[in-house]
Image: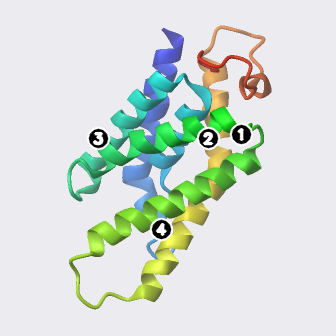
Amino acid sequence: MVKQAFLFLSFVLLLIFQVTVLPSWAIFGVTPDLMLIWVGFVSFYLSPLMAIFWSLVAGICKDMFVGVEFGLYGLLFPVYSFGLILILRKIYIGSNFTRSLCIFFLAFFHNLLTGRLILSGLEGFFYGVFFFKLIGSALLTAVFLPFVFFLLLRLNFLLSAQNDFDPEAATTDTEESGDKI
């Protein structure tokens, strides 16, 4: 019950922060994608089925609040989660640097794909601005990832009744199918 409360509470907090606070703190229109960080978090720390479920929820919520083609993020986020799970089965990703690098490439690919899909019907948009937002958003997402992971793991610690919870132990790949948080 505590784990479900943690997942729901952390998801709602990230969603509210993404929708309300981050747009006013945008740097030249570029903000980190907290929902994409959430997809990475659940893919790194939960079982594959739960990760894909929470990624679908994040995608549907982002579809509702962003206002682009409905279903785009609901389709892409579970695919990203599945891809991260496949990568985790082949490569050990234990440090925040490698996680940030993985999320940077995922955010870059995501911004490239969604940006081209959204802007494909526009005539004469500026490629320089597009590439600045493409790289800037992916870089900000990767920079925010360790801080968000740290806060989420600490929130889990506070909500957990276990006094011996070790966030470093949660990053090991000892259990292949079980939840790590």
Q: Closer to us: mark 1 or mark 3?
A: 1
Q: Mark 3 points at which residue?
A: 60
Taking 43 as reference, is 68 above or below it?
below
Q: In which quarter of the image is residue 110?
A: bottom left
Q: What residue type is labelled 1?
A: Ile
Q: Which residue is nearer to you in this view: 140 or 56?
A: 56
In 3D space, how far apart are the residues under numbered discs 2 and 3 (Cα atoms)?
Answer: 24 Å
The picture places residue 131, in percent across and down from the top left corner, at: 49, 79
Residue 26's disc number: 4
* Quadrant in which residue 74 is drawn: top left
Q: Residues within 10 Å of mark 2 (few under 14, many from 20)?
A: few
Callout 2, which amino acid?
A: Ile
At mark 4, the secondary structure is: loop
In percent of the image, x 74 and y 26: which residue is there? 167
Q: Is mark 2 on a helix, strand or loop?
A: helix
Judge whether residue 24 can be spotted in this image: no
Q: CB under 8 Å between callouts 2 and 3?
A: no
Task: Determine which residue is flagged by label 2.
Answer: 87
Gap in angstroms between the C-alphas marked 1 and 4? 34 Å
Q: Label 1 belongs to which residue? A: 91
**Mark pair 1, 2: CA separation:** 6 Å
When the figure is inspected, residue 148 is found, relative to residue 11, above or below; the finding is below
